[in-house]
Amino acid sequence: MKQEKDGWLTPVPKQSLSKMVVEKIKEGVVSGAIAPGDFLPSEAELSERFGVGKSSVREAIKMLEALGVVEICKGNGSRIRTSVDTTVMNPLIFQMILQSKEESKEKLVEFRKMIEISGSMLAIDKADEADIEKLKKIHEKTKQDFKKGRATVENDLEFHKAIYESTHNPFIVSIGESLMELFQPSLVISNRDYSKIVTENHDKILKALIARDKELMEQAITDSLTQWKELSLDVSMN
């Protein structure tokens, strides 16, 4: 059993070093050999087992710390985090931002539509009364802020985040939050210049959720995204 558990602790290709150390540690986590909360072997042991210098191990640990995967406990070593570090920038967002510069607007709309409709459909199945009340409060705050001339994107982001949270699925929440961050520049335009449309679209989405009507929800999101593309996304990407 010990030999199987240590299967990830094998030498890395000489040409890769610190990045390959990261990959080997990832291999250990994926395989279950290292669990959240487990301390990694010491720097000296990792260096010996991987066949690389201590500096490469040290650099790899720092990379993993920056990604929010590892936390360094002074005097005790490094361990795999047991929860997501919300203060760390999600690397997935950077990947999507870079990808968005190369792809067409149509593909971006297609991507958002797929995620948003799927998430909203599950929200219809999973949302409880507390979720719906939270969405009502966010929607009401949005309307009141617009009336006072405060067009902040935060309310919009909170509304969509609450939809994803209503699925009670942490994987969908994570992807949903990354998606909304990717499109934040266009959402700023929507809230600044088209507050009435934003309010109307959120109202339709909320009503569909309350009614548990999937057909109505799909239509509401489709209409909302069509307007978002034409009025905001095209402007933000020009």
Image (cartoon, rainbow, N blue to C red):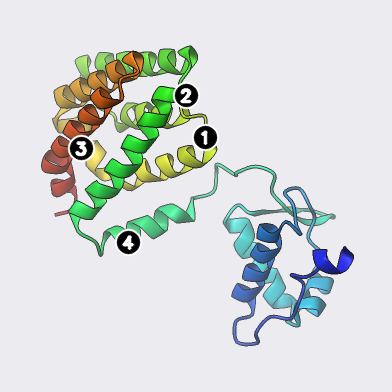
Of badges 2 and 3, nearer the viewer stands 2
Image quadrant in which the N terminus is located: bottom right
Residue type at tag 2: Lys
**Figure check: 97 above or below 8:** above
Pick whichever of labels 3 and 4 is earlier in the sequence.
4
- Under circle 3, the secondary element is helix
Q: Which residue is depicted at the point 84% across and 72% down? A: 45
The answer to whether the residues at label 1 and label 3 have Cβ atoms under 8 Å apart is no
The residue at which mark 3 appears reads as 225
Q: Distance between the Cα atoms at labels 1 and 4?
A: 26 Å
Pick whichever of labels 2 and 4 is earlier in the sequence.
4
The residue at which mark 2 appears reads as 126
Q: Is residue 191 left or right of residue 21?
A: left
The answer to whether the residues at label 3 and label 4 have Cβ atoms under 8 Å apart is no
The answer to which image quadrant residue 134 occupies is top left
Pick whichever of labels 2 and 1 is earlier in the sequence.
2
- Under circle 4, the secondary element is helix
- How many other residues sit within 10 Å of disc 1, few (<14), some (14-19) or many (≥20)? some
Q: Which residue is depicted at the point 69% across and 48% down? A: 81
Q: Which residue is depicted at the point 86% across and 69% down? A: 3
Pick whichever of labels 1 and 4 is earlier in the sequence.
4
- Which label was assigned to residue 169? 1
- Which label was assigned to residue 99? 4
